[in-house]
Image (cartoon, rainbow, N blue to C red):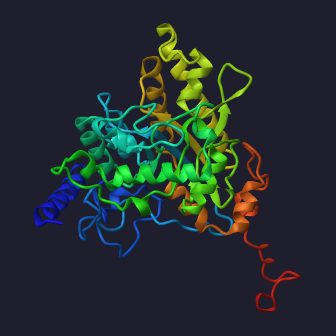
Amino acid sequence: MAATQRIAVGAMVAAACAASLTGCAGDATAVKPGAPGPEQGAPAPGSVFRPIGDGSTAYTGAQPHLPGPERLSPGQKPPQFVVFSWDGAGEDSQKLFSHFREVAKENHATMTYFLSGVYLLPEGKRDLYKPPQHSPGRSDIGFNDERGIADTLEQLRLAWLEGNEIGTHFNGHFCGPDGGVGTWSVEEWKSEIAQAKSFVKSWRSNTGMRAEDPLPFDYDKELIGARTPCLEGRKNFVKAARDLGFRYDSSGVNDQVWPKKKDGLWDLSMQLVPFPGHTYEQLTMDYNFMVGQSGTQTQGDPDKFDYWGDQMRDGLLKGFYRAYDGNRAPLIIGNHFESWNGGTYMRAVEEVVKEVCTKPEVRCVSFRQLADWLDAQDPRTLARLRSLEVGEAPRQGWASFLSGSPAPAPKGVPGAPADQR
């Protein structure tokens, strides 16, 4: 990497730190009170710089604002985790990626952005994409132009520097029986994943945009999880993902209970929560609320926009409080950067972020942070947590429910250790 490119990346990192409301690594104000701090001894971003491949990405040190996980102490009440995640994350004229980055910072939250690889592939190079069971250059969500790629790159850089996770939503977003992801084999999934990585790792060569700074992370190491298009094709995707070293999947539908591993990956799927005004529950995603309100028509009756947004907001909040006051199961929420029904769902999720993420004992985190925390726990503790049903709080309280062993008898009573008598 040329010296001028090295300087450019250093300037980018410095600018990002200066612009961030939460500061840079080592800034104590960046971590929510009560949350563990940054990993000690880790190099700050920008203090090291190793370009990768054509310079589209680079290793710049440990990710800032990524708290290390802590194991629960015996009897300790678990925090209430909430994950906000975004499918197909990219920056367009709506500026929703940048908007929700700011919302997250203002409310002590980090999030997961599932990037669609074709958002970094220009229209003129579309034939580089060879989707399984489709002709080269085919994509149901199109490709991008230079402005869109540059804007998306900027948001990805800043998001990562602020502690957010960059996952993948793959590429062409094919759904349905005609070549959709639900029909793909394990090997076809591996091809799709490899191409999604390639478009991120080679955007500089594919676009010729040499003036843009690299992404400040190694995507081969950063990418540990995904959500499949339309929640289809999960069975074979999980097999491929496990072989490729992924750590979690968010492509299913769960109840609000503590997660477990399936086929070697944490199952961090979205969940069913109350749907106000209905007797059934709804999945924690904007698209599903929309379908339950206006069908597949993305701009329904304008007179109902506010009501529909309130319905989603209130449903998510009911699900949150059911867990917060109950079993403390992580709440998993999925969205798109969209303007369906007048943007009412974007308002709804923003209001949820603002209400829940600043509450005591709540951690609004990325999937990576949640997976790290789960991996750090005693398996016996997680098994106890999974025994709680939806909304069920321990009858005898958390201290008794998660005690590591029976409490010793009081000093001086029969059964107490001899040295306490």
Residue that sits furthest to the front in the current view:
135
Q: Quadrant of residue 141?
A: top left
Residue 361 visible in this rendered orientation of the protein: no
Position of residue 280 relative to residue 226, above or below, is above
Q: Quadrant of the N terminus?
A: bottom left
Residue 107 x %, y %: 40, 44
Q: Is residue 13 left or right of residue 250?
A: left
Residue that sits furthest to the left in the current view:
4
Residue that sits furthest to the bottom in the current view:
419
Image point (42%, 55%), residue name? 32
Position of residue 275 relative to residue 214, above or below, is above
| Number of marks drawn | 0
Residue 83 x %, y %: 52, 46
Residue 114 visible in this rendered orientation of the protein: yes
Image point (32%, 68%), residue name? 61
Q: Quadrant of residue 70?
A: bottom right
Q: Is residue 166 left or right of residue 29?
A: right
The residue lying toward the viewer, choosing from 396 and 22, is: 22
Q: Quadrant of the C terminus?
A: bottom right
The residue lying toward the viewer, choosing from 22 and 366, is: 366
The residue lying toward the viewer, choosing from 235 and 373, is: 235
Q: Is residue 410 left or right of residue 192?
A: right
Image point (72%, 63%), residue name? 402
Residue 72 x %, y %: 61, 66
Residue 198 x %, y %: 38, 53
